[in-house]
Image (cartoon, rainbow, N blue to C red):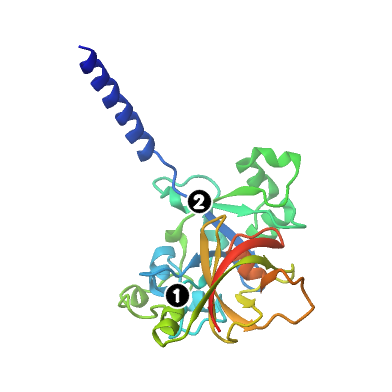
Amino acid sequence: MRYLLLFSLLCITLRISGQAENTEVPPKKFIHYLDHVGLVLIESLDPGMTLYGFSRKYNVSIDSILAANPDLVPNAIPLGYPVNIPIWPGSISFSPPAGINQEMELVYQVQPKETLYRISKGFLGVSPETISNLNPNVGQGLAIGQVLKIGWYVPSSIKAPFAASSVAAGKDSILLKPKDYILEAHEAGNKIQEQKGLAVWKPGNVNAHFYVLHPTAKVGSYMEITNPMLKRTITAKVAGHIPPGLYQSNVGIVVSPSTARALGALDQQFYARWRYVE
């Protein structure tokens, strides 16, 4: 009898645990505002994904994606590159649309010197009340790094010429496939260096350029950078070497503001890991 009772309790525990797993809330999508580009989602070009894949997923034309990523060369896209996916403000619903996937819920992380008015009117084109209704705690003021609920992305509301074309949707997935430059360099006999340490960046105009400075990395190559705190990895182009004496001796890499944002770094100094070719 005692064993039967224990077995019953075990079944109930497993059932409750299974229900908890099934009700896990999918991660939210962070939306950003870039100067001269507008609202974007930043998606790392991971293995198996292509620009056409992003086009179909978000119903955004390839031309719009390329325009939001001036550094991209269509036939030489580095694996792990943080691609800016342009978001038309009219595609955002400020109330939960019926039947929409929870993964399309959008959030925004408050940056230095930003106000509720600037985020709502300047970025989204709506009244501050629209955003405050989604975030009752904003009446106490915004804090740097605070995460605001923005709304829900509705891809089906996007129309031409911004929407993905039927031609792009029918393209083979191998087109515009990213290249693993780190792997190619290793196979070519080049030594891949791995380091970890302090990464820094300076606030400035946030654009669509993802680059990094390093003391010895090959200029023009690509560096794989990881923010271990957020488990976020991207690839950025080595634009040059760190000028001697400009930074403290313990600084390992200097990244652009866009690179820092793609890595989720809010503080101007953060711990990182990186792989590169000398």
Q: Position of residue 164 (x, y in %)?
A: 41, 71
Task: In this rendered view, identify the residue nearer to me: 8 or 140.
Answer: 8
Q: Position of residue 229 (x, y in %)?
A: 57, 55
Query: What element does badge 1 sit on?
Result: loop
Identify the residue at horizontal 23%, vertical 13% (top origin): 2
Residue position for label 1: 79
- Contact flag, marks 2 and 1 (Cβ < 8 Å): no
Give the mark nearest the N terminus, 2 or 1. 2
Query: Distance from label 2 to label 1 (Cα)?
Result: 23 Å
Which amino acid, by three-letter code, is at mark 2? Lys
Query: What element does badge 2 sit on?
Result: loop
Asked if residue 86 can be seen in this view, the reply is yes
Q: Which mark is residue 268?
A: none
Q: Position of residue 6 (x, y in %)?
A: 26, 19
Q: How crowded is the residue under tag 2: few (<14 C-alpha within 10 Å), some, or many (20+)?
A: some
Asked if residue 84 can be seen in this view, the reply is no
Q: Which mark is residue 28?
A: 2
Task: In this rendered view, identify the residue nearer to me: 99 or 244.
Answer: 244
Quadrant that contains the C terminus: bottom right
Above or below residue 152? Residue 213 is below
